[in-house]
Image (cartoon, rainbow, N blue to C red):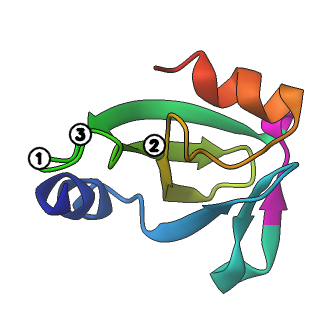
Amino acid sequence: MVETLNNLRERGYAVDLNLQPTCLECPQLHLELKPEEFEIDEVYRFEGASNPSDNSVAYAVSSDKGVKGVLVDAYGVYADSITPDLARKLRREY
């Protein structure tokens, strides 16, 4: 996972994004991206070696505001609760 994140950063996906119930948040830029304001460029899934419930997914995200960043989130039973619009945007990518 570290190699993937480093590779994405080298390719310009420089900001960290957080998943919020209705949007992706970029704390560094004080920015919120609604589902219609960003695209998922790449998706990487990772499974925990020792525990199958330790799953995560990394998204390379670009926005119509010129921001490129990375969202890393758990998936499966531990995934956060989000709006249907945001869920459709993220789930159709993996």
User: Residue 78 at x, y = what percent?
Assistant: 55, 47
Residue 59: mark in rendering: 2
User: Residue 50 at x, y = what percent?
Assistant: 13, 50
User: Residue 49 at x, y = what percent?
Assistant: 11, 47
Residue hosting label 1: 49
Residue 47: mark in rendering: 3
Would you call the spot at circle 2 few (<14 residues within 10 Å), some (14-19), or many (20 or more)? many
Q: Are marks 3 and 2 in contact (CB under 8 Å)?
A: no
| Residue at 80% from the left image edge and 41% from the top image edge | 37
Q: Is residue 12 left or right of residue 61?
A: left
Amino acid on which disc 2 is placed? Tyr
Counting labels gives 3
Image quarter of the N terminus:
bottom left
Image quadrant where residue 39 sits: top right
Q: Is residue 53 left or right of residue 72?
A: left
Front: mark 3 or 2 = 3
Q: Is residue 54 magenta?
A: no
Tell me which segment is drawn in magenta. 32-36
| Residue 64 or residue 84, whichever sits in front | 84
Q: CA distance from mark 3 to mark 2?
A: 15 Å
Amino acid on which disc 1 is placed? Ala
Front: mark 2 or 1 = 1
Q: CA distance from mark 2 to mark 1?
A: 20 Å
- Element under label 2? strand
